[in-house]
Image (cartoon, coloured by chain):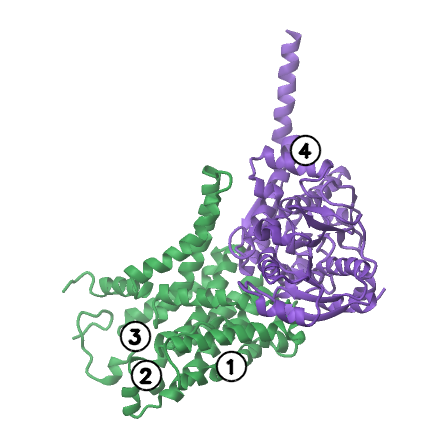
């Protein structure tokens, strides 16, 4: 009889078993342990660490959205930060009138509408041409915000302060703890949605259209609708991330949703592993922690070697970012998710090897 | 023998003095790499060197300053992280940098009550709401642009002016006030053109020429300004150029060369080549701490020094008043500040209602490869009227 706690072979006998999320009880148990670990983690971290953790969670949510558009549907998107920005500015406008738990979906829906509009060119163009169309959206977004007095022309739009949630007052000391739990809850829910996406007809259409849209068309799928829907869904994720970022940073400023951030999201998706769930978490975590560690390292370098006129220490930080992307593209194009897969494979049959 | 004991006693006092010196942290978060780092790196060096000088000379007895210059790469998330670290550590004052970062931090600065001295002179930093704890070292971009418009109106009554601004809150900051001031001054702003990192401005300049523009006033950084004035020179246009603090200075001369000749620049800082105690102080400090000529010549170097100096002066005042060095006491000291400094053309004065340090500005003109003052220090006559309706 098969041991339900381990996988020592392939016992799948039906399509339902083949699409199951958890193959063994140990997978369910490890996820439960991980979730509990994440819930108690703030007890062991100081406020500054929580701030970084929050940022990683919010970026992970945005990268999940990018992975729907670029990873699953294969549509290159260089305007993802703009979708996040649409969500953030929506949040800034509606937050004085709605509770935060209502602001998040509203921001996502407005961003999804923007995503659907941006997706329309995908009906006729693809590859690099579509990438340019998304770049155009990024620039239009920045221009539109910069010329809208209602949006402070890109200056700061403050988010509401002194929020109270079930008697719990959110202020400076607990700000990042509160938004950690909100971001984590939202991320878990939306990650489950992402994970289940490929088990749906729409999710399979995304991959089919990515691999060969003509073949997908011939098999009865609608490539146009699929692409537009991919943009809308991906933008929804980004919009919710934007609203969370607005609350987390306490104000909405255009610079947080610039082209540089869009490129950063692409880098996170690539380093994490395009089209993978776990890569959407690993990419942002890796690049954010790399940056912080390189910052510390650069100060240490400055202490040891700081010749006048050549700022070696400061140069190391951007260099590390660029180098990480290039090295991943050359040596591990499947990203950190592949390392995770190999690690899991190693332990899957442990201690009994094939 | 007696001398020997005296020396030992002196050494012991010195050692005790260092051992008991209170360590006070001052953090700056700005762009040493990334966008605008051409200004940020020299600004950071100004802060570092002023701090080193204060420590080396014992300018504030009983306090050893630990000045940290953090590279936030012009990324607001990094600025926020650095600021919160300073709050958690209990720093008494924080030195900021970018417009976006400062505007974003405004509500938090107000919430935690930590005095904040930015490198951005955006008027929105000190306009309500949430404006109690932010202090500009010198007059705002809006006041700078109005001051240069006043000068233009004086030398060319009825002039036609175009504003060439950076496509960001930094660039757009003075536009509204400048338009109002132009109306009062009888000059005409015929166009407001946003300009980023363009390599060729022929079309824009030809359009300006067609509209009869006599002056282009820049609220931008030196790079794009240099490109535009070089293009204007290449096209043989008779248009004159002028700009606010970050648009001009020795950096512009280095980038634009001869094309910068005649550029009118408004700032509150003394230039290193000028005679006077301030210029000498900047040069001496740069030489003492091994800074290259580009750093010493740059206006961002004394700008960083002034920001650090204001913070240190407020801490010194709090210390002299026998108060604990914390954010609230430094804030109270800032509100009473009236300090005759050597770095800028006027004293640094603050009050509850006035959060602009140096109120005076000068217009300088590029002549023969240096900026030469063409006015005495003055305050804009119109700024308060157009901005505050006073």
Q: Chain of mark 4?
A: B
Q: Name the colour assigned to chain A in the rendering.
A: green
- Is residue A238 or residue B164 the one in the foreground? B164
- Is residue A37 or residue A88 the one in the foreground? A88
Which chain does purple denote in the image?
B
Disc marking residue A22: 3
Furthest residue toward right:
B390
Is residue B308 shown to the viewer in this render? yes
Furthest residue toward front:
B236
> On the same chain: label 2 and label 4?
no
Q: Earlier in the sequence, mark 3 or mark 1?
A: 3
* Occupied quadrant, residue A337: bottom left
- Looking at the image, residue A269 sits to the left or right of residue A156; the answer is left
Q: Residues within 10 Å of mark 1 (few under 14, many from 20)?
A: many
Mark 4 highlights which residue? Answer: B62
Q: Chain of mark 2?
A: A
Q: Residues within 10 Å of mark 4 (few under 14, many from 20)?
A: some
Mark 1 highlights which residue? Answer: A114
Furthest residue toward top:
B1
Picture mark count: 4
Q: Chain of mark 1?
A: A
Mark 2 highlights which residue? Answer: A209
In the displayed structure, B56 sits above or below A109; it is above
> On the same chain: label 3 and label 4?
no
Q: CA distance from mark 2 to mark 4?
A: 71 Å
- The residue drawn where x is 19% and y is 82% is A13
């Amino acid at each position: 009889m098969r041991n339900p706690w381990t996988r020592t072979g392939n016992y799948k006998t039906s399509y339902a078993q083949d699409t199951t999320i958890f193959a063994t009880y140990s997978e369910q148990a490890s996820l439960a342990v991980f979730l509990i670990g994440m819930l108690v983690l703030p007890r062991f971290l100081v406020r500054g660490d929580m701030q970084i953790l929050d940022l990683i969670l919010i970026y992970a949510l945005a990268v999940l959205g990018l992975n729907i558009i670029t990873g699953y549907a294969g549509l290159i998107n260089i305007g993802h930060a703009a979708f996040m920005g649409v969500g953030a500015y929506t949040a800034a406008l509606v937050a004085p009138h709605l509770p935060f738990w209502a602001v998040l979906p509203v921001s996502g829906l407005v961003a999804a509408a923007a995503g659907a509009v941006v997706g329309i060119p995908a009906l006729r163009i693809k590859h690099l041409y579509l990438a340019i169309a998304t770049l155009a959206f990024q620039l239009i977004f920045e221009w539109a915000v910069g010329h809208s007095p209602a949006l402070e022309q890109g200056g700061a739009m403050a988010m509401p302060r002194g929020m109270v949630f079930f008697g719990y007052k959110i202020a400076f000391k607990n700000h990042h703890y509160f938004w950690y739990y909100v971001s984590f809850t939202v991320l878990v829910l939306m990650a489950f949605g992402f994970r289940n996406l490929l088990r749906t007809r729409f999710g399979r259409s995304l991959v089919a259209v990515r691999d060969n849209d003509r073949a997908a068309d011939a098999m009865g799928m609608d490539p146009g609708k699929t692409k537009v829907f991919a943009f809308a869904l991906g933008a929804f994720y980004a919009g919710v991330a934007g609203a969370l970022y607005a609350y987390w940073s306490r104000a909405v400023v255009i610079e947080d949703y610039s082209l540089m951030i869009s490129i950063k999201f692409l880098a996170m998706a690539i380093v994490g592993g395009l089209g993978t769930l776990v890569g959407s978490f690993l990419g942002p975590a890796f690049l954010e922690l790399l940056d912080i560690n390189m910052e510390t390292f650069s100060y240490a370098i400055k202490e040891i070697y700081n010749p006048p006129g050549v700022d070696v220490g400061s140069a190391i930080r951007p260099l590390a970012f660029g180098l990480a992307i290039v090295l991943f593209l050359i040596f591990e194009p499947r990203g950190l998710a592949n390392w995770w897969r190999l690690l899991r494979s190693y332990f899957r049959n442990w201690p009994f090897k094939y | 023998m007696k001398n020997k004991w005296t020396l030992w006693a002196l050494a012991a006092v010195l050692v005790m003095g260092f051992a008991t010196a209170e360590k006070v942290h001052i953090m700056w978060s700005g762009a040493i790499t990334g966008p605008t780092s051409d200004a940020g790196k020299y600004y950071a060096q100004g802060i570092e060197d002023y701090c080193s000088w204060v420590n080396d000379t014992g300018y504030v007895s009983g306090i050893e300053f630990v000045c940290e210059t953090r590279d936030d790469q012009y990324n607001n998330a990094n600025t926020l992280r650095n600021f919160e670290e300073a709050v958690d550590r209990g720093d008494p004052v924080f030195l900021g940098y970018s417009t976006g970062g400062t505007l974003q931090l405004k509500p938090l600065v107000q919430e935690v009550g930590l005095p904040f001295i930015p490198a951005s002179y955006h008027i929105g930093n000190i306009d309500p709401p949430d404006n109690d704890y932010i202090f500009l070292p010198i007059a705002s971009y809006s006041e700078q642009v109005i001051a240069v418009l006043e000068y233009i109106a004086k030398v060319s009554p009825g002039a036609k002016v175009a504003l060439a601004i950076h496509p960001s809150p930094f660039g757009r900051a003075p536009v509204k006030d400048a338009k109002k001031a132009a109306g009062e001054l009888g000059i005409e702003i015929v166009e407001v053109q946003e300009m980023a990192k363009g390599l060729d401005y022929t079309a824009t300049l030809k359009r300006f020429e067609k509209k009869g523009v006599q002056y282009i006033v820049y609220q931008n950084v030196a790079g794009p300004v240099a490109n535009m004035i070089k293009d204007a020179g290449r096209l043989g246009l008779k248009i004159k150029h002028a700009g606010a603090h970050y648009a001009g200075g020795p950096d512009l001369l280095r980038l634009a060369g001869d094309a910068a000749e005649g550029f009118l620049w408004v700032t509150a800082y003394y230039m290193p080549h000028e005679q006077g105690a301030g210029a000498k102080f900047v040069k001496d400090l740069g030489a003492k701490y091994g800074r290259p000529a580009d750093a010493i010549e740059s206006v961002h170097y004394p700008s960083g020094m002034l920001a650090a100096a204001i913070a240190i002066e407020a801490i010194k005042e709090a210390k002299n008043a026998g108060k604990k060095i914390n954010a609230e006491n430094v804030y109270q000291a800032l509100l009473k500040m009236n300090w005759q400094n050597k770095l800028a053309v006027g004293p640094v004065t603050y009050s509850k209602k006035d959060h602009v340090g140096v109120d005076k500005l000068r217009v300088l003109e590029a002549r023969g490869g240096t900026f030469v003052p063409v006015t005495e220090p003055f305050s804009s006559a119109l700024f308060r009227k157009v901005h505050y309706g006073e």
